[in-house]
Image: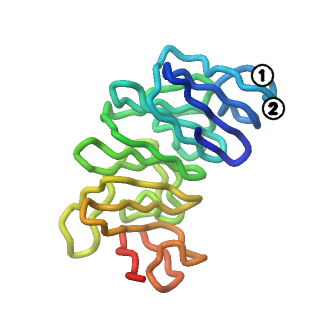
Amino acid sequence: LALGTSDSFGLTAAGQAYNWGNNNLGQLGENCGGFCTTPGQVSTTQVFTSLTAGVSHACGLNTLGAAYCWGANGSGQLGVSGGGGSSPQAVSGGLVFAQITAGDNHTCGLTTAGALYCWGANSFGQLGNGGTTSTSTPTLISPPAGSVAITFTSVGAGSAHTCGITALGIIYCWGGNGSGQLGTGNTNGSMTPLVVSSP
């Protein structure tokens, strides 16, 4: 299962994506009007191994690790230029991912080598690339200040922040921090990864 703000997605054992709920921006990938009160299959030939959902977009990884996204694309969260749509579109760049996660309006993909790429909304620095400009191009996150590149084993995206954990169990977070969600002991946001404070 993958849950968006007001929609839900389920993946069958055969890799078929089904969805239901709010479809105001085509995030359900089917023509059922504004709301879908029963599950309907996403119209695509792709066989998915995992799904994730944001506020009004969704993404999945196929059996080859290629990412496909659909729904709204006002901030580039689908990983393609131009408008959104109800048909899954291949994320630009041809990267192979082991994991994908969606925030409200941004998306991040973790490669099999542990490199983390993000795209979409970036007004709070949630893409972790050192800036606040949104982009539809998957962009490698910047390493922490004074550090070499880091690799992750798992990643998760919140509303406007992102966190990843390394093989050593170190957690890094970046993006909006108005409620202390970065775990750094303050409420200052960050455009690059910061280590979460020890409990």
Q: Residues within 10 Å of mark 1 (few under 14, many from 20)?
A: some
Give amino acid for label 2: Phe
> Viewed as shown, does residue 108 lie left or right of 176?
left
Residue 94's place in the image compared with 190, above or below, is above
Asked which colour scheme the image uses, the reply is rainbow
Residue 174's place in the image compared with 30, above or below, is below
Position of residue 31 measured from the top left corner of the image (x, y, whole percent): 73, 20
The furthest residue to the top: 45
Position of residue 168 measured from the top left corner of the image (x, y, whole percent): 24, 65
Judging depth in this view, the residue of 170 and 193 nearest the camera is: 170
Element marked by disc 1: loop
Quarter of the image for residue 143 reads bottom left
- Look at the numbered discs 1 and 2 and tell me whether their residues touch, using CB distance below 8 Å: yes
What's the residue at 65%, 33% (across, down)?
27
Q: Which mark is residue 32?
A: 1
Q: CA distance from mark 1 to mark 2?
A: 7 Å
Q: Count every numbered label the image shows and give the total.
A: 2
What's the residue at 49%, 75% (across, down)?
189
What's the residue at 59%, 59% (across, down)?
159
Considering the image in quadrants, where does the C terminus appear? bottom left
The furthest residue to the left: 148
Position of residue 133 measured from the top left corner of the image (x, y, whole percent): 47, 57
Considering the image in quadrants, where does the N terminus appear? top right
**Residue receiving disc 2:** 35
Give amino acid for label 1: Cys
Residue 21's place in the image compared with 170, above or below, is above
Judging depth in this view, the residue of 64 and 148 nearest the camera is: 64
Position of residue 144 measured from the top left corner of the image (x, y, whole percent): 28, 70
Element marked by disc 2: strand
What's the residue at 29%, 61% (across, down)?
166
Quarter of the image for residue 148 reads bottom left
